[in-house]
Each structure stands twice: as structure tokens, then as C-alpha cells.
Amino acid sequence: MIHSGDNHGARSGEWQAAREAGARALTPRDPPRAAPSDVIVLDLITTIGELEALLPRWRALWRRIDDATPFQAPEWLIPWWRHLGRGELCVLALRCGERLVGLVSSTIFHETVGRRARKFTLMGNGVTDYLDALFEPRLRADCAAQTFGYLARLPFRWDLCEFSQLRPESALFDAALPVTFNAALVLHEPCPVLRFHPGARALEDVIPPHQAANVKYYRSRAARFGALEYEPATSKTLASVLSDLFRLHGARWSERGCAGALAEPAVQRFHREVAQTMLDAGMLRLNRLLLNGRVIAVFYGFTHRRRSYFYLGGHDPAFSALSPGTLAIAHALEQALEERVESFDFLRGREPYKYLWGAVDTMTYRRSFADGAKQARKLAAAR
């Protein structure tokens, strides 16, 4: 069954044709009957209202998947669409009866730089370190097959499908594709991860000796200047802590002649909404470091399913001699140890400081494909 609604304005004739083609492919011609519990039905979601109506079932599905990250949660993706999304919402919801068993949060947008193409991509592009679909573990292969089968039936809606930031364990990474698809799989970006060995309790148990010595040195040096205080964000202080993060992150990057990742107002609005929803869900780890009452660093991250994620941070360049970034990360690692997490993910990028903590690269991949049959028809028509 295909369910559709208005999408940023009037529906084009092409979209109507796509909807009807999908309906013919996925809906029986006989009068509707209740789907058996083991039959997967695909619904197409095209409006934010329809997507928000899925929230309870979406959240329940996300919680049932052990390796899901915070970046597949509605707390991350709904704000992304509101503030940073572009193109047409095109979310594939897969269900058995009324139970949601799969969700491919995706969009179609028109790429105008370089080769013009209509891209089918996962929601979260640009600001998200791990992109993925959510598939019920026992139905993982079936959900992936339904997803790619649906895309094959609607080739005129998209020119290129591109799934970036995929982990090797993603169902989208190795699922079989229709025979007409021309596919490519390439290394994308590394995410350095520090893994905690069982029984680790102190910072010295999980980081290299040279970095433990650095932490001890900078803590001692900071103590000579005054009192250090770590303050976690609360519902009352969240807005001011985020303002400190935006200010300090921008100050650090301005020294390099760059605006930084948080400079755009839309990005700041996105993170304000995300931080509030993540705080409500118990996943937010947003701490500011104060020296004699003055904010000198902010750590921004998340924790879910025994894994901590360091999204980004900022520090006051005036206190660089005290390495406030090092102090903030050290505190976050100690907090993670107290929470008995199993790993600390520095997320994408090969910045040298990550490896000082003992992090080791884990790779992500980009899988892209186009419909070869459609390309052949285009070439034939051009002759």
C-alpha cells in the first residue's frame, strides 16, 4: 500500500504517475484485506505531519534495534528535516499489520552542482556521522529487498541513489540489488573509536600513558589558576550552554579563518531542538567547563546503548595553554566510564587529537547506484 500526501506544495504530474505506479505494484487489485502478520506492506510518507504521526512506532522500532545510533532516532531526524532538510520528503515505512518493522528515512532532492541529478538519499545528510535505515532484525533481509524493489519500480522519480556514512553492519551496505542497478561501493570517512576493555574503571585504564600524563599535567596547571567546575546542561541551563557552545566553537574556528560548523542560524536552530529532545530522552551529554566561574570549554555529545558519541566541542582560545578541550574530553570519558559504556566514538574525521586518546579508525562507506535499464533507454532515445 502506498500512502501519500502533499509535499511542499502541489504534487507534480510526474509524482502522481509515480504514486499510481507504486500503488499498482504494491497493492492488490482485489478489495483490501487485512495483511497477514508476516507480510510486509510498504507505505510512502511524504509530509512531516504523517512522519510525526509515526513517532511512537518509530521510537519503538529504534529501541528494538541493538546497533541503532542516536542519529536514526526521531529526536535527531525530525529536527533535521524541519531546519536543514531540502527537496521532497520520501520516507519508506514498512509494516507487518500495524507493527512498524522498517523505516527508510529519506528524501529526493535535485542536485544542481556539477551533473544535474535527482538524488534519493537518507535524511540527515551533512550533519550526521552515521546514516542508516531501521529494519527489524528478524526481517532485515526482507525489508531491504522490499526497499530496493520499490525503488526499482519507480525509476523515473530518481536518477541516483546515494547512501553515505554506512557502517559495515548496515542492512543497506550489503543487501542484494535488482539486476538492472549499476552500483558502486567506496570507502567514505573514518570514525575513530576508543573501546573500553571489560573491567575498566579509571581514565588511566582506557587511554595511553602519554595522554594520561597530559591530562594530569593540564589539570594540575589549571588548578594553579583557580577552581575548575564541570556543569552538565539541565532544562533550565540548556539554552545558555548551547549559546556558549556556539560562541566558543566559532571562536576556535575564527582563528583559522573559518566560520565553523555551527555558524549558520539554521544549524543552530537544529541543534537547539535536538539538544532539547535528546535531553528529554536521557541521551544528551552537554557539559561546560568553568574556571573561576568563566566558561572555557563545552563538550557536546550523546550516550545510547553503552556507547558514547563526541559530536563536537568548543573552547576559549584565550585559555589554550590549559588545553581546555583536553580537560573537557577527559571529564566526558570519566562520565562514560561511570555509566559503564563500552566505547567512546569520536565520530567522523581524522583529526590528530583523536588518536592521542587511543582511538582506532572504524570505516564508513558510500553505496551509490543508478538504474541501468533507465540509462539505456535514455541513450537509445538520444540516438
Image (spheres, rainbow, N blue to C red):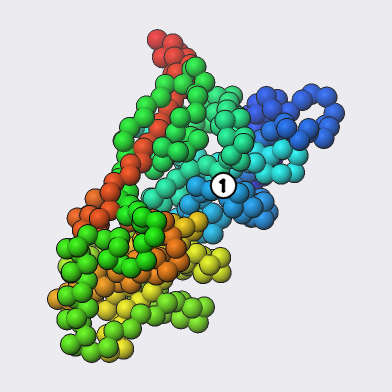
Mark 1, Cα crowd under 10 Å, few <14 / some 14-19 / many 20+, is few
Q: Quadrant of residue 320?
A: bottom left
Q: Between residues 244 and 263, which one lies in front from this camera angle?
A: 244
* x and y, in percent, of residue 74 in the image: 56, 55
The vertical placement of 340 against 231, above or below, is: above
User: Which residue sits at x=48%, y=52%?
Assistant: 69
Residue 104 is situated, as x and y percent measured from the top left of the image, at: 55, 41
Q: Residue at x 39, y 80 (%)?
A: 231
Q: Position of residue 347 (x, y in %)?
A: 34, 53
Res. 272 in view? yes
Q: Give the secondary structure at mark 1.
A: loop
Q: Type of residue at label 1?
A: Ile
Q: Residue at x 39, y 56 (%)?
A: 198
Residue identified by numbered label 1: 65
Image quarter of residue 329: bottom left
Q: Residue at horizontal 57%, vertical 28%?
A: 145
Foreground: 3 or 110? 3
